[in-house]
Amino acid sequence: MMRRRDCLAAVPAAMLLGSLPQSAWAQANAGSWPRYGYDLANTRWNRSETIIGRANVGRLKRQWSAAAPGPIQAHPIVTEGMVIYGAHDHGVHALDARTGTERWVVRPEANRTVPAYEQGIRASFDTQDWRLYFIDSRTVAHCVDLKTGREHWATQLDEQSARHMATSRHAPAVHGNYAVFGHSGYQPQIACLDSSSGQILWRFYTGNGSLWTSPAIDTATGIVYNVTGDAHSVRPGDPALYSESILAQDLATGELLWYDQLEPADPFNLDFSCHPIIFDATGSNGALRQCVGAGNKRGFYVWERRSGKMLWRSQITPGSMFGGPQADSTAYAYNRIYLLSNVFSANQPPSSVAACLNAFTGDIEWWVHNRSSTTCGVCVANGVFYVGLADGTLRGFDAGTGAVLWEDKIGSTVRGVTVAGGMLYANEGEVYIRDQLKPEGYRIHAYALGAAA
């Protein structure tokens, strides 16, 4: 059952953050993809992209491919002329965005206490004022110089990470003085750190609910939203509080404002693995809704973001452990929700559906079947919806109609697609051979427009 405060009409003091002027840093990154979800609302919509669009996306050609020292399990970011990714070698790698040559690499200490598939830098990044923020597989939060990789600070979140089997795929969200991190394990938590010093300002333990993705921050109200996964263990009569939930908290203090637990004590792993998205939706009569939405393995859910009242939900494919929206395969643009939703059936190979929903009502506007499933963050830019599939296929759909405008294929499962500055970047994720992780042969690829026919 949802529990929420009735005093949300009173705006938190942290709303003053929204009045900060645009920094020189923000202006310099107008043509980049500077954080995991593109912006603090996690829309995955690059409004600044003007070079690649519906009219010419079919001319995208591969410009370079760079060898990676292992699978790249999270979405790369693009900023300051660099594409930055984390890999299974426990390294953060910064490449020249135009040529693919390496600018710098930093490797935090490895975590050997978790299974091989959980090792390495599995989470993506945020940037602010020429600093790069990320978390490693030991739940150490890091802040490094964006231009050189030199470390500014490092803060351990779980002091008993080995005992708690703690690790992280949770990309941070940084706004002003606040840097919000999280991790999974047997004592998962949300932690807000001082972005300048790394000092822990507040913590919130989510019971059994692991954090698999990035928070969203409403800069106008100072509210941070997180979603959680399934419980590690379920005891009879125990709802496993805060598992499979969306949580709204005051960014400055960590005070819980409201939450909604969709699957109490769920034994079927129907967790949220898609980050919350903050957006405004306009109805056909001009009515405005201030929303926060997120996808779990049953479908996509939308709430009124101040009160926590659920507004609508939409299920595109059958819910299951591997079904529905997965791994941040959701985006918002043009008053629509775009998503990939997996289809897993005992009698058919895995596949997925690309769909476009009306952001005000949840009605389906178009959908297209794909021959493969996904574990890939998607993106929208200049009228095109870009997706990556488990069989290595990249596709660009017309965001208005669902028509396939472009397609290509890379060497293994796609784990991220980023469009910025007239370039598209896609990375290859993990491949298993007889249940063993393939140790090498992974690449990151860059595309740009080729000559007109």
Image (cartoon, grey):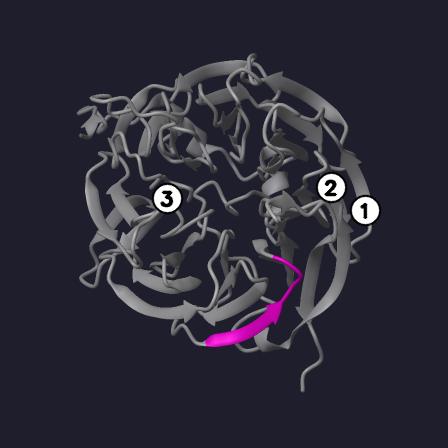
**404 relative to 361, above or below:** below
Q: Nearer the viewer, mark 3 or mark 1?
A: 1
Q: CA distance from mark 3 to mark 2?
A: 29 Å
Instruction: State the residue lying farthest toward the bottom.
Output: 453
Q: Earlier along the polypeptide chain: callout 1 or callout 2?
A: 2
Q: Residue at x 57, y 61 (%)?
A: 49
Instruction: State the residue lying farthest toward the front.
Output: 434
Mark 1 burial class by Cα count in 10 Å: few <14, some 14-19, many 20+ = some
Verify whether residue 22 appears in magenta.
no
**392 relative to 113, above or below:** below
Front residue (pair 182, 161): 161
The residue labelled by disc 1 is 102
Q: CA distance from mark 3 to mark 1?
A: 34 Å
* Span colored in magenta: 404-412
Q: Earlier along the polypeptide chain: callout 3 or callout 2?
A: 2
Q: Nearer the viewer, mark 3 or mark 2?
A: 2
Front residue (pair 237, 340): 237
Q: Residue at x 59, y 49 (%)?
A: 33
**Residue 287 point in image, percent of width and height:** 20, 55
Contact between marks 1 and 2 (CB within 8 A): the answer is yes
The residue labelled by disc 2 is 93
Residue 278, numbered circle: 3
**Camera sees residue 198:** yes
Q: Quadrant of residue 135?
A: top right
The C terminus is located in which quarter?
bottom right
Question: What's under tag 1, amino acid-wise?
Answer: Glu
Figure disc tally:
3
